[in-house]
Amino acid sequence: MSTTISQLENLYSQQTLSTFFDISGLHSDSGESISSSLESICQKAENGITINRDEALYLNELDYNNLLRLLLSASEIRNKGKGKTLSFSKNVFVPVTRLCRDKCGYCTFKIEPGEGELLIPPDEVLEIARKGAQLGCTELLFVTGDKPELKYKVYREALNELGFNTTAQYLIDLSEKGLKENIFPHTNLGLANTEELEQFRQTNPSMGLMLENISDRLLYNGQAHHGCPDKVPKLRMKTMELAGELNIPWTSGILVGIGETCEERIDSLFALKRLNDEYGHIQEIIIQNFSPKVGIRMENQPSPEFIEMIKIVAISRLIFGEQMNIQVPPNLNLETYPYFTLAGINDLGGVSPLTIDYVNPEAPWPQLDKMQQMCEENGFELKERLPVYPEFINDKYINKELLHVVSNFVDDTGFVAQQEETDGRN
Ligand code: SF4
């Protein structure tokens, strides 16, 4: 038996490993002859030294015999920084408006006027917030299309009737009101300016914007982001830089399988790494797989293969090191998400007892008890977090008044305190 396998067996259950081998096509006798280049890259990463682009690309080309060594490294680096804790958050998902000025090739979220509500009115949003809080949710996840006010007159008029000119202004107001319902807004607005971000910061302990990919090529005719002014990579990076200047804990990540090359995928991870090295505000990296759906422009494009996802997740762990929180959305990988633990993830994302994932409506959320069972089988502790991760709950990242409210929800580890410990929060 190879050393790699026996080390993995110390970390994961036989059941998890054998199912993983079934799904991945790998064999448990893999890893017998590890290349010296791979060994030195893994050791470098395990010693806390960031791997470089060439090394990441080398890892991306690993054959099956060597892949287990990469997984072992990703697991050990995760364990060093995060222990054997897997986090999740309880959220309610609010698609404030599904109108959007962009035309992403993979989108099923966007609607046109006449195909549904122009926007969810404030009373309905607050009802969702209230119900979510009653069910123990702590995250009020606001998702919108990008800047529909610049494209649709009828939407502009609907916003004006509510007293707003932009979607951002509406969300800032909803965030203020939502917070009063004892649930924390986490807004995914799209591109934003400093003034808007400053206002969101008053009520959102964290926010998010996926980079998706750093390549301008995906904007070209026929590519996934053709006709999407909000998907220009340098504009997305700029929004995240502004957030960094304001110390807003930020969730970002990449989309895998939207027509990008392996190099573009790796370059996207390094772009986020550089951003975080400069500002330190990236709290979480999501590695999200494209999922084809009937009726979208990319309906015939396949999802990335499981093994491709496993590789890029493990490479992400080696690029970002032990401190980064890394998530693969479980609802897009319902059968396979437990096996991404082997590639170094430490977060299982948002789980909602109330609302569906409107961006991927075909994908139900994994049940909490199944997540719990998976954790127990593999020696992990499942811990509930707020939308903001524990290490960002301090006065550098959260303003004083909001920090006071946040502190009422967490224990001294920064994870969500059990209800009996939080009598004062409601
Ligand atoms: S920006 Fe979002 S909502 Fe708009 S088209 Fe792209 S994926 Fe859909």
Image (cartoon, rainbow, N blue to C red):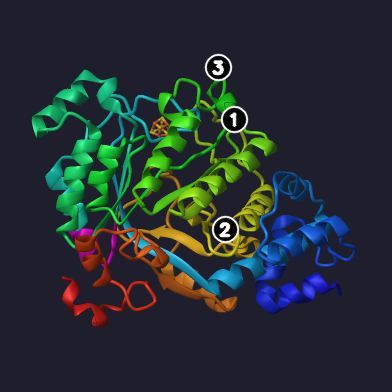
Disc 1 packing (10 Å; few <14; some 14–19; many ≥20): few
* Comes first in the chain, label 2 or label 1: 1
* Comes first in the chain, label 3 or label 1: 3
Is the N terminus in the top left, top right, bottom left or bottom right quadrant?
bottom right
| Image spot of residue 293 (x, y percent) | 50, 36
Q: Report the side of 82 relative to 149 (left or right).
A: right
Viewer-proximal residue among 422 and 54: 54
Circle 2 residue: 335
Above or below, 379 against 161 in this view is below
| Image spot of residue 125 (x, y percent) | 19, 47
Q: Say what amino acid the circle numbered 3 marks.
A: Asn
Q: Which mark is residue 66?
A: none
- Label 2 element class: loop
| Image spot of residue 28 (x, y percent) | 80, 67
- Label 1 element class: loop
Q: CA distance from mark 2 to mark 1?
A: 22 Å
Q: Is residue 288 visible?
A: no
Tag 2–tag 3 contact (CB < 8 Å) = no
Circle 3 residue: 221
Circle 1 residue: 300
Q: Say what amino acid the circle numbered 2 marks.
A: Glu
Q: Say what amino acid the circle numbered 1 marks.
A: Asn
